[in-house]
Amino acid sequence: MKKILLGLLVTGAVGGVAFYATNAFFSDTETSTGNTLQAGAIDLKVDNTCYYNGQACTQGPDDRFYWGGLPNHPSPTPATNLCSCTWKSKNLEEGDLFFDIEDIKPGDWEEDTISLTVENNEAWLCADVHLTSDDDVTCTEPESETGLADPECSAPTPSPGTGELADRVRFLWWADDGDNVLETCEFPNAPPDCKEETTLPSGPLGVLNVSQTAHVTLADSNKNLWSGLPNDPIPQGGDTWYIGKGWCFGRITETPVPQDGLGPTIPITNGPDSPRGGGFTCDGSGEGNETQTDRLTAEISFRAEQARNNEDFLCNPRPL
């Protein structure tokens, strides 16, 4: 009996080994490690170069910025020769101001070349101008004389928002090629590949009520200001896109010069007083005393919106 049981156990053991062997199939395993999904980014860099009444705001020997580049240089602003409207490409910080003049007078003008660079992803570009105040700070004796068109100055203290400066300082914006001059192709013998510099909606900020914002299209699904094409977003990195901005305390008139096609490869010209001119003129002869001591403030923003999967984007969307 023991022999029979022992024989069965041996047979079972051999059978078990045989069963294990028949399940050792050929196999191979490949593993992909480190699979990751990470959100992309868009970073908009801005720089600016400005001129006030023909003086360039440039860096001085002490690394601060002055009109004319020198601390003791004759200044267009009597209070100080310091200026704050020129900086290199960066994220904007407090104190980076496209205009900051405390003592403007009729006939004064300023011109800027703003450059925009989009990093990391292609994007749509918009500009937003927000009027934050338009005040008559005080009523001077010439301003409050009988017969002047400033009835707010009949009160001892003018009410907020009753200033006239936002109506009298007129702005001009255009798509520039980086040489700080408004240029045109509408002249005899213009080359076939001449690139027209398109003006943007312009005029006084007084068309806005205080706390209102004007949305300006630079590139959205309707139009790219530089190429003139629809559905043409700003590519990521590398290229720089330029906006020209001028303002005049008085009447501003476009006087574009022939396109030279050189763009920013030549030294930036010195506004309307340069040999080529700035592409506009300023005439303050029609201004009166009603704007004395008036003050306006505004916020200027540039924003980049992702273009991929956002094909219908508009800088100024239509009401629903």
Image (spheres, rainbow, N blue to C red):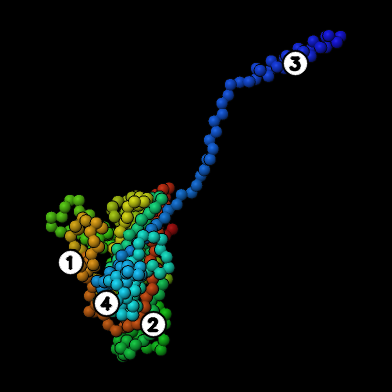
Count residues near mark 2 (Cα–Cα under 10 Å), then give few for <14, some for 14-19, many for 20+. some
Q: Which label belongs to residue 137?
A: 2
Residue 117 locus on image (x, y percent): 36, 56
**In terms of secondary structure, where does tag 3 sit?**
helix
Disc 4 from disc 2: Cα separation: 28 Å
Mark closer to the observer (3, 2) = 3
**In terms of secondary structure, where does tag 4 sit?**
loop
Quarter the C terminus occupies: bottom left
Disc 3 from disc 4: Cα separation: 107 Å
**Residue occupying image coordinates x 25% and y 76%:** 107
Task: Pick the residue in front: 149 or 238.
Answer: 238
Q: Residue furthest right?
A: 1
Residue 66 locus on image (x, y percent): 32, 72
**In terms of secondary structure, where does tag 1 sit?**
loop
Is 113 on the left or on the right of 308, as rendered?
left
Q: Which residue is mark 1?
A: 275
Q: Are marks 4 and 2 in contact (CB under 8 Å)?
A: no
Is 101 above or below relative to 128? below
Name the kind of residue labelled 4 in the image: Pro
Disc 1 from disc 3: Cα separation: 105 Å
Task: Pick the residue in front: 209 or 143.
Answer: 143
Q: Which residue is mark 4?
A: 74
In the rendered structure, which disc, 1 or 3, sits on the residue that comes first in sequence?
A: 3
Numbered-mark total: 4
Q: Are marks 3 and 2 in contact (CB under 8 Å)?
A: no
Name the kind of residue labelled 3 in the image: Ala
In the rendered structure, which disc, 4 or 1, sits on the residue that comes first in sequence?
A: 4
Q: Which label belongs to residue 13?
A: 3
Count residues near mark 3 (Cα–Cα under 10 Å), then give few for <14, some for 14-19, many for 20+. few
Count residues near mark 4 (Cα–Cα under 10 Å), then give few for <14, some for 14-19, many for 20+. few
